[in-house]
Image: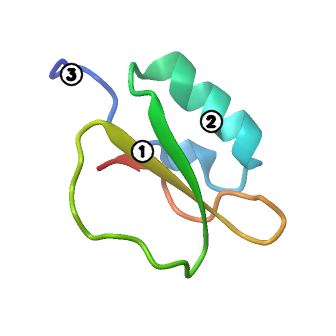
Amino acid sequence: MSAAQKRVWPELVGKDADSAIKVIKKESDITDIQTVRDNSPVTLDFHPSRIRVFVDEKNIVTVEPRIG
């Protein structure tokens, strides 16, 4: 990962998950992109090769997707 690589996508909050993931794939070389329902249990470990996209019951992004 280069220092210039984007690390967070605040502009995707409120967008549908499929569209958000397409943007992330276009702007990042990270391939481990996980869609996670709000309030689901997740590990707290940091992985620089992972992005989690938190969504509500309508598949809308609720939290800024970020590397980790």
Q: Residue furthest right?
A: 58
Point out the tag, 1 or 3, that comes first from the N-terminus.
Answer: 3
18 vs 37, left or right, is: right
Q: Residue at x 65, y 27 (%)?
A: 22
Q: Position of residue 39 (x, y in %)?
A: 56, 82
- In which quadrant will I find the N terminus? top left
Alpha carbon of mark 2 to alpha carbon of mark 3: how far? 18 Å
Note whether 26 is above or below 6 in the view shown: above
Depth check: give the residue in front, 6 or 18. 18
Depth check: give the residue in front, 42 or 19. 42
Q: Which residue is mark 1?
A: 51
Q: Which residue is mark 3?
A: 1
Alpha carbon of mark 2 to alpha carbon of mark 1: how far? 10 Å
Local crowd at mark 2 within 10 Å, few (<14), some, or many (≥20)? many
Point out the tag, 2 or 3, that comes first from the N-terminus.
Answer: 3
The quarter of the displayed image where residue 30 is located: top left
Question: Quick one: SS at disc 3?
Answer: loop
Depth check: give the residue in front, 25 or 10. 25
Q: Which residue is mark 2?
A: 21
Local crowd at mark 1 within 10 Å, few (<14), some, or many (≥20)? many
Q: Position of residue 32 (x, y in %)?
A: 44, 36
Point out the tag, 2 or 1, that comes first from the N-terminus.
Answer: 2
Q: Residue at x 66, y 57 (%)?
A: 61
Amino acid at pointer 2:
Ile
Amino acid at pointer 3:
Met
Question: Quick one: SS at disc 1?
Answer: strand
Amino acid at pointer 1:
Ile
Note whether 24 is above or below 39 in the view shown: above
Alpha carbon of mark 1 to alpha carbon of mark 3: how far? 13 Å
Q: Position of residue 43 (x, y in %)?
A: 32, 70
